[in-house]
Image: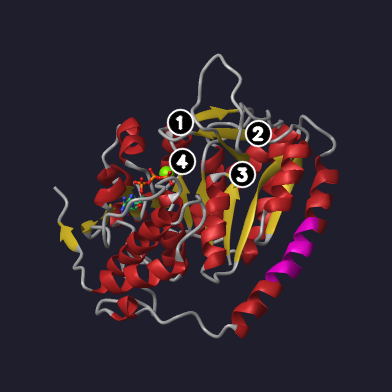
Amino acid sequence: MIVTVTLNPALDLTYTVDALVPQATNRVRTVAERPGGKGLNVASVLHALGEPVLATGLLGGPTGAHIEALVRFPAAFVPIAGDSRRTVTIVDATDATGLWEPGPTVTGAEWAAFLDHFAVLLPEADAVVLSGSLPQGLPPDAYAVLVRAARAQGVPTILDTSGEPLRHGVGAAPDIVKPNEHELAALGQHPTDAIAAGVRAVVVSLGHRGLHAHTADGTWRMPPPAVVTGNPTGAGDACVAALARGLRNGVGQDDRTPSALNNGAGQDDRTRAALNNDRAGEDNDRDGADNHHVGERSRHVGEHSRHVGEDYRHVGEDNRRDGPREHNPAEDRPGNRRGGTTWPAVLADAAALAAAAVVAPVAGEIDLTQYQTFRRTMQGVQADVQPHR
Ligand SMILES: Nc1ncnc2c1ncn2[C@@H]1O[C@H](COP(=O)(O)OP(=O)(O)OP(=O)(O)O)[C@@H](O)[C@H]1O
Ligand SMILES: [Mg+2]
């Protein structure tokens, strides 16, 4: 299964008004609510595709309980004391205005409990998705710690975040990094530097212009199946869902650069993995030292995980009932390795799925009919690869 991590989930509220007037009382016509946060969007898309998925992260307070009640796919969150945040979007005929609550501050003990929980999930994970911002209280290298913990268990990771968490995360060499143009510019690093440091692919999403995937082979350029109109929020999350599925299917398994392997960033380097494991353990100990309830929380989480395991088996049964996953001819192209899949096939799928997410009005949803149409369109699209400079 694919595990998605959302450390800062939100209850997304959308208020519709006729015309927003500042410094006045505005009557709200409709209120819509949904579970928000990038990892939840990714899980939602994967679940809609029939892929076994488990969403995890941190949730707390009445808002956290409400988010959990709205989630429609297998999930196992670690409880925190603070109330999860709400994001309010006010939509009128001309524009949208966002109000983002600051969210809870996570304690060291809660972070330590999450690390324990993550370690319990890793043996079941085929790939891990790390998405979105970090809540207050977490160290900026939180994703780097999770990347190393996953690699120590041989589990590939994909990272989609921004700012300092992205900078630290890239330093731990996740398998795939998915910045958009602005996130890449703020990182101030050329993708080839990340590739040299052991990242398999830096997939840069360019809005309606499609995707550029920097890999050890060079840079693949993938246009969208069509430029569509709709809601582009969450298109990046759909793109990440497709990349995660590609990662699970073995894309780029042989791609880490020789220099990166020599540096020990390769997945097969057990010594390095063990070292990383120790480091994650140190972080864990440091955080755990602040609080004596960690063990208690961990036991609670363990119970929760067993429930989720049951849910997961249900999902698996559903999938079996529905028959095998639809055959993707794009995956039959020459050059496929180890029964896995190629970058062009995965990027074509990502472009199709992301466009289908733009067409669907709500973030975290995809238009499945359009997705099939876009996939057929993508079969006629030749990916273009350019060697590194
Ligand atoms: N108008 C569009 N038409 C077709 N495809 C689109 C369009 N907008 C975006 N996409 C697809 O979605 C992908 C992701 O979009 P974008 O670069 O906006 O991601 P993002 O900024 O990470 O979004 P978010 O974080 O809100 O999910 C693009 O690489 C492209 O393939
Ligand atoms: Mg994004």
Q: Nearer the viewer, mark 4 or mark 1?
A: 4
The residue at the point 39 percent across, 62 percent down is 353
Inter-mark Cα distance, 3 to 1:
32 Å
Q: What span is colored magenta in the figure?
A: 304-312
Mark 3, residue position:
32
Disc nearer the start of the sequence (2/3):
3
* Left or right: residue 48 compared with residue 203: right
Disc nearer the start of the sequence (4/2):
2
Disc nearer the start of the sequence (3/1):
3
Disc nearer the start of the sequence (1/2):
2
* Left or right: residue 209 compared with residue 326: left
SS under mark 3: strand
The residue at the point 55 percent across, 55 percent down is 150
Q: Within 8 Å: ligand 1 and the Cβ of disc 2?
A: no
Q: Which mark is residue 372?
A: none
Q: Dot 1, crowdedness within 10 Å: few (<14), some or many (≥20)? A: some
Inter-mark Cα distance, 2 to 3:
16 Å
Inter-mark Cα distance, 4 to 3:
26 Å
Mark 4, residue position:
161
Disc tally is 4
Camera-side residue of 240 and 285: 240
Q: Nearer the viewer, mark 4 or mark 2?
A: 2
